[in-house]
Image (spheres, grey):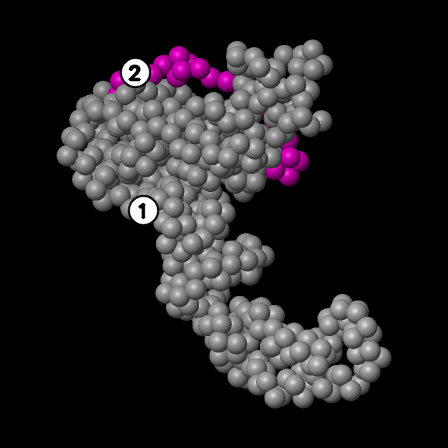
Amino acid sequence: MSIFNSEWEAVIGLEVHVQLATESKIFSGSSTNFGAEPNTQACNIDLGLPGVLPVLNKEVLNMAIKFGLATNARINTPTTFARKNYFYPDLPKGYQISQLESPIVEEGYLEIITEQNGNKRIGITRAHLEEDAGKSMHEDFEGMSGIDLNRAGTPLLEIVSEPDLRSPSEAVSYLKSIHSIIRYLEISDGNMAEGSMRCDANVSVRKKGEEILGTRTETKNVNSFRFVEKAIEFEIKRQIGLLESGQEIVQETRLYDSNANVTRSMRSKEFANDYRYFPEPDLLPVVIEQALINNIKDSMPELPQEKKERFIEEYDLTEYESGILSSDKDLANFFEELVKTTNKPKISGNWVIGELSAFLNKGNLNIQDSKVDAKNLGNLILRIEDKTISNKMAKEIFEEMWNSSKTPDEIISSKGLQQVTDEKEILALIDKSIEENPKQVEQFKSGKDKLLGFFVGQVMKSSQGKANPQQVNELIKKRLEE
């Protein structure tokens, strides 16, 4: 069943939980380092022991303000905290300190690129601060569960979109935009595998043209772009199937099973009144002065959209090229470092988007883990530009650079890969090919122009691929037409 060529449309909103990159937790001085031994980074405040008081981490506020400014949002002042009451084994206090009324960020938006309609504005309802819960572990305990409270109290920024998304691909585009912004701002590493960024997908369906929203489900804690797309796609198909068979959608929380590519019911969906929110008595309302907002605004880095526009203007790149190169901060920095070496933005961009990205994707690596740095890739490109090597040779050399950490010049020298550009040497190879293939020469002269490629192939073969292809083409044509 197609989810796009039917009478149905999907209505999607995302709740994105971003772990903020502070050194200490939102209300305590405990470390937020990832990977420590279980229960070694949780103090009395994180555990909610009697008599302890939370103290707000100022840097958390600064990071939230940065995000609000980057998404064209309103910064609320005062901003207030509330207790969200619920019981989980990994939430020892029995409540979570979060924000309900007057969250720090409200009414923002960002632009995404969609496959069907180009640019589309997606509203951001709010972004509020809260503390993370701990983590329940089941794999290592037969018949029992373990609780690791290291994550308890880690600062989260929960970003809630308007239900403006209409397809799984739009949802992924929005999520990637959020990911790009938080990394540019350096407020989070956005590492989804480590839980630094997690996504809850709210999905409903309705007949096209209807205004009333359908009953929605929430799929919790999806931790990769691909899984978000797959989970939403499955949920849309599931809901359409139920409605077309005369059944109703149950409002509930679901989990995505990536192995089976299905969503499964987890629990009935909670409402705000189920949490019994009330103002946090241990934290006063926080008044944010305009001077602080202005200072943060003045120190904001160049953001992805701004960088994309600069790349188009400064480097004469296409929108597609600049979009890819500016999507990730580290990738953009690598590209600009490369251009410093080559002074050739177009070919540099092509190598980053093409060969380099292919090797990174094959190894499931980030640009920071590239086995070829910008300087060495730049030197390889310069060897193409000065005609020392051909494009084909360059790709072979790049592969060896990747596997051996050798410089391009070391590989070119050790393997004798210098391109033959001496006209006399190339003409000698051409004359030999003409002499050995008189029948093909006659056929070419009688109008079979396609045989030019035959002679080019012969010369390239006899030169072991070292002859400059452009020179070979020009000189063969000239020779045969004499």
Q: Residue 278: which disc? A: 2
For the question of whether residue 136 can be seen, the reply is: no
- Give the image quarter of residue 339: bottom left
Tag 2 secondary structure:
strand
Q: Which residue is mark 1?
A: 302
- Give the image quarter of residue 104: top left
Q: Residue 353: which disc? A: none
Q: Nearer the viewer, mark 2 or mark 1?
A: 1
In this rendering, the count of numbered labels is 2
Q: Could you tell whether 238 is left or right of 371 in the image?
A: right
Residue 183 image offset from top left, x and y in percent: 37, 45
345 is within the stretch colored magenta: no
Q: Is residue 42 above or below residue 397?
A: above
Q: Amino acid at mark 1?
A: Glu
Q: Is residue 277 above or below residue 72?
A: above
Residue 441 image offset from top left, x and y in percent: 79, 79
Residue at 30 percent across and 18 percent down: it is 101
Boundaries of the magenta span: 258-280
